[in-house]
Amino acid sequence: MKSKGNDYKEWITYAQSNLSIAKAGKKISKSVSMEDLCFNAQQAAEKPLKSYLIFLEKKYPKTHNIKELLDLLEKEKIVIPTLIKKTKSLTSYVATRYPGDYDPISVKEYKEVVKNTNTKDKLF
């Protein structure tokens, strides 16, 4: 049966997968780019927010904007921990999934992104 994307637990599973990929880094393959790893880190931060909105039975727009998702949760009177609020800066890594006009991501930046992403357990 085809999933309709409305199972909040499934969203968490996908977020965990994204985080595992982001954390694995170059161990996956030397050809994996820092940009792709950072995009997976961004997805690992975004999907738990969408999961929570699904759990609350609230609609949300098709967006990768973490701040927008955080704002929706705050409108529902959900107290967002500071650590989670910091993930809104990860939205900029959505653009890195395609070649484009951005600076290359260093190993140091990548490590900081992954560190800031490992937050899903802080939300639920």
Image (cartoon, rainbow, N blue to C red):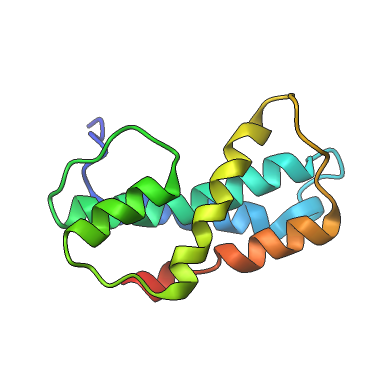
Q: Residue 116, image x and y in percent?
A: 60, 66
**In this orientation, which residue lies closer to the viewer: 56 or 28?**
56
Q: Residue 65, image x and y in percent?
A: 44, 42
Above/below status of 38 relative to 111:
above
Above/below status of 55 relative to 122:
above
Above/below status of 101 relative to 71:
above
Image quadrant for the C terminus? bottom left
Q: Residue at x 39, y 35 (%)?
A: 63
Q: Residue at x 76, y 33 (%)?
A: 102
On screen, residue 124 versus residue 31, left or right, reads left
Image quadrant for the N terminus? top left
**In this orientation, which residue lies closer to the viewer: 4 or 47?**
47
How many dots with numbers? Answer: 0
Camera sees residue 17: no
Residue farthest left in this picture = 57
Q: Residue at x 65, y 62 (%)?
A: 114
Q: Residue 5, image x and y in percent?
A: 27, 38
On screen, residue 68 versus residue 88, left or right, reads left
**In this orientation, which residue lies closer to the viewer: 5 or 78?**
78
Q: Residue 6, image x and y in percent?
A: 21, 42
Camera sees residue 101: yes
Q: Residue at x 52, y 64 (%)?
A: 86
